[in-house]
């Protein structure tokens, strides 16, 4: 993109951001650390200082000390919906937009909305509210971050269904970690301050096992630290070469998902743009790889887009050459591929162009990262 176009785009982005609401996220290693409690405490402080703050949606999980804090705070009534014969309630996004408070508190950022809602996910509602110029305070647990899904599964043995794209965190103006030691969290659990008595023993064997809490705590601390570092990099620009990552995937969907998530983490850490490249060879044409593989590819493209990537699809019988061209076109600094046993790597190694690619990358100071 020419410099003039980049300057114009940057200026437009500044205008949009100046009109947009400020976004604060409380993040924690697990349920029960006190994110909702802290949001309600902040609401009382702001209210005492004459700020027009309202509660759009809060989830107390029947915790007495949290529920008591709602007293005296202005609530926006929830929207009632009937789903599968049951009356359920949701955040009333339209009511928030109509009332247009200075600040609104919206809990459970990763929540999936009831079918029939305007947006599929609550984080999408929050983005609409921010774009309307309303400031938002919200909360999420570390296990709900999309690019950490595989790590969370390895730690807990559980695949978390409700997730938010990493781009949501990067949109936050402030990310605050609500931290407790493993012992403090387990004590709260045993005292019945997190779950009812019948769920305590099960929780102690699952998410609240000490070794799991320690690992989740480490992830939460690292995430907030990287968000702070990104903010410093953004607000105090350093005259360094901009990193740009290119994730290269094949139709092997399980490996592709890991490459996508890990590249997204790298790009997030460096506050960089990143791209997903899929090269469709004659062997991978739609009629040759089957419907299931096609569906997985589409899902992986969607995942990459949600994580902030620009998806590039190229038809070329020579994968190495296609990577070479995409790298030059997008001014890539780092190429990310899967382990050498992957089909993608095997195909690259078999091509004569691979040596040319390596020479070009070496001359251009471009790195290749092989992801485990």
Image (tube, grey):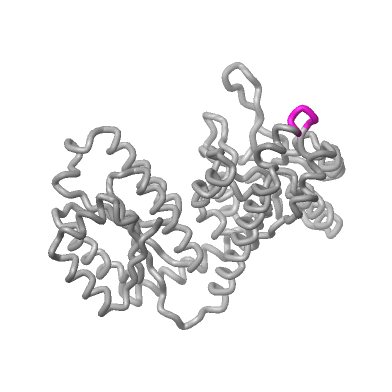
In the image, is residue 311 part of the stretch drawn in magenta? no
What count of labels does the image hold? Answer: 0
Which residue is at 28% across, 49% downward?
Answer: 250
Q: Position of residue 112 (x, y in %)?
A: 56, 36
Magenta extent: 196-200
Tell me: 87 left or right of 11.
right
Who's the residue at 44% across and 56% down the image? 262
User: Measured along the vertical axis of the image, is residue 128 above or below residue 242?
Assistant: above
The C terminus appears in which quarter of the rendering?
Answer: bottom left
Q: Nearer the viewer, residue 229 or 202?
A: 202
17 is higher (above) or lower (below) than 38:
below
| Foreground pick, 359 / 6 | 359
Dominant secondary structure of the residues highlighted in magenta in the image: helix
Looking at the rendering, in which quadrant would you find the N terminus?
A: bottom left
* Quadrant assignment, res 312: bottom left
**Residue depicted at x 48% and y 66%:** 13
In x, y percent, where is residue 209? Answer: 69, 43
Question: Residue 75 placed where, x, y %?
Answer: 76, 41
Q: Is residue 42 visible?
A: yes
| 71 with respect to 221 (left or right) | right
Q: Where does residue 236 sit, x and y in percent of width and height?
A: 56, 78
Q: Nearer the viewer, residue 217 or 212?
A: 212
Extreme residue toward the top, this view: 85
Q: Is residue 197 in the magenta section?
A: yes
Foreground: 346 or 259? 346
Q: Which residue is drawn at the image coordinates 69% and 59% (left, top)? A: 176
């Amino acid at each position: 993109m020419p410099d003039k176009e980049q300057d114009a785009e940057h200026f437009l982005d500044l205008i949009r951001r100046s009109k947009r609401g400020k976004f604060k996220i409380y993040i924690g290693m697990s349920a029960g650390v006190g994110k909702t409690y802290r949001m309600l405490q902040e609401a009382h402080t702001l209210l005492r200082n004459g700020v027009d703050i309202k509660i759009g949606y809060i989830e107390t999980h029947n915790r007495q000390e949290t529920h008591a804090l709602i007293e005296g705070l202005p609530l926006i009534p929830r929207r009632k919906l009937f789903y599968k014969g049951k009356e359920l309630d949701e955040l009333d996004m339209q009511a928030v937009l109509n009332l247009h408070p200075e600040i609104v508190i919206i809990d459970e950022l990763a929540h999936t909305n009831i079918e029939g809602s305007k947006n599929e996910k609550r984080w999408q509602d929050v983005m609409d509210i921010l774009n309307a110029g309303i400031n938002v305070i919200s909360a999420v647990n570390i296990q709900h971050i999309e690019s950490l899904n595989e790590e969370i599964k390895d730690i807990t043995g559980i695949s978390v269904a409700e997730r938010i794209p990493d781009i949501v965190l990067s949109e936050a103006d402030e990310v605050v970690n609500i931290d407790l030691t493993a012992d403090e969290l387990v004590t709260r659990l045993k005292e019945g301050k997190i779950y009812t008595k019948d769920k305590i023993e099960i929780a102690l064997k699952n998410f609240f096992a000490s070794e799991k809490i320690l690992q989740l705590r480490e992830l939460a601390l690292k995430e907030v630290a990287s968000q702070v570092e990104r903010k410093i990099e953004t607000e105090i620009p350093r005259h360094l070469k901009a990193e740009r990552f290119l994730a290269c995937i094949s139709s092997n969907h399980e490996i592709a998902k890991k490459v996508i998530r890990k590249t997204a983490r790298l790009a997030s850490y460096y506050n960089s743009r990143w791209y997903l490249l899929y090269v469709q060879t004659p062997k991978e044409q739609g009629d040759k790889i089957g419907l299931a593989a096609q569906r997985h590819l589409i899902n992986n493209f969607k995942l990459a887009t949600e994580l902030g990537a620009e998806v590039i699809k190229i038809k070329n019988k020579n994968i190495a050459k296609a990577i070479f061209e995409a790298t030059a076109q997008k001014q890539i600094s780092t190429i990310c591929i899967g382990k050498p046993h992957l089909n993608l790597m095997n195909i690259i190694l078999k091509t004569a162009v691979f040596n040319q690619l390596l020479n070009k990358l070496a001359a251009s100071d471009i790195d290749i990262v092989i992801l485990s």
